[in-house]
Image: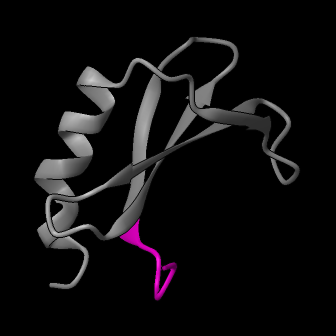
Amino acid sequence: MRRMKFFDCGIELIRKSTLEPISKENSNKRSEILHRFAGISKDKELFFVQIKEDKRTGQKFLISIFPVEKWQ
């Protein structure tokens, strides 16, 4: 349940972000790129959205949306 409250924020972040995510090749699977977006909820909580991209097909998959504990 803790992560579910960030789902709507995460989807909005992906759709409306003007900043590029932090992207790197997946060290465990070279055929994938991992993208990480950072956002702040309306309750001032920092959270991340992780997406993986298949290099061959270009398909993207939502991996997770999770809060960061005590970042302030």
Q: Judge whether 2 appears above or below 10 on screen.
A: below
Q: Which residues are magenta?
A: 66-72
User: Across the whole image, how many numbered discs are drawn on residues?
Assistant: 0
User: In x, y percent, where is residue 17?
Assistant: 35, 25
Residue 16 falls left or right of residue 37: left
Q: Quadrant of residue 35?
A: top right
At 42% from the left edge and 36% from the top edge, which residue is drawn? Answer: 61
Q: Is residue 7 left or right of residue 52?
A: left
The scheme the figure's colours follow is one colour
| Most distant residue in the front direction | 72
Residue drawn 15% across and 84% down?
A: 1
Taking the spot 38% from the left edge, 50% from the top edge, the residue there is 39
Which quadrant of the structure image shows residue 54? Answer: top right
Residue 45 magenta:
no
Q: Is residue 7 above or below residue 16?
A: below
66 over 23 or under it: above or below: below
**Residue 64 coordinates in the image, percent (x, y):** 40, 59
Residue 52 versus residue 43: which sits nearer the camera? 43
In the rendered image, residue 13, in percent from the top left (x then y), is placed at 28, 36
Question: Is 38 displayed left or right of 21 in the figure?
Answer: left
Q: Is residue 52 left or right of residue 43?
A: right
Please provide percent x and percent y for residue 29. Answer: 81, 45
**The one of 2 and 16 positioned closer to us in this rendering:** 16
Name of the residue lying farthest toward the top: 57
Give the camera-side residue of 29 and 10.
10
Report the predominant secondary structure element of the magenta stretch: loop
- Residue drawn 21% across and 40% down? 11
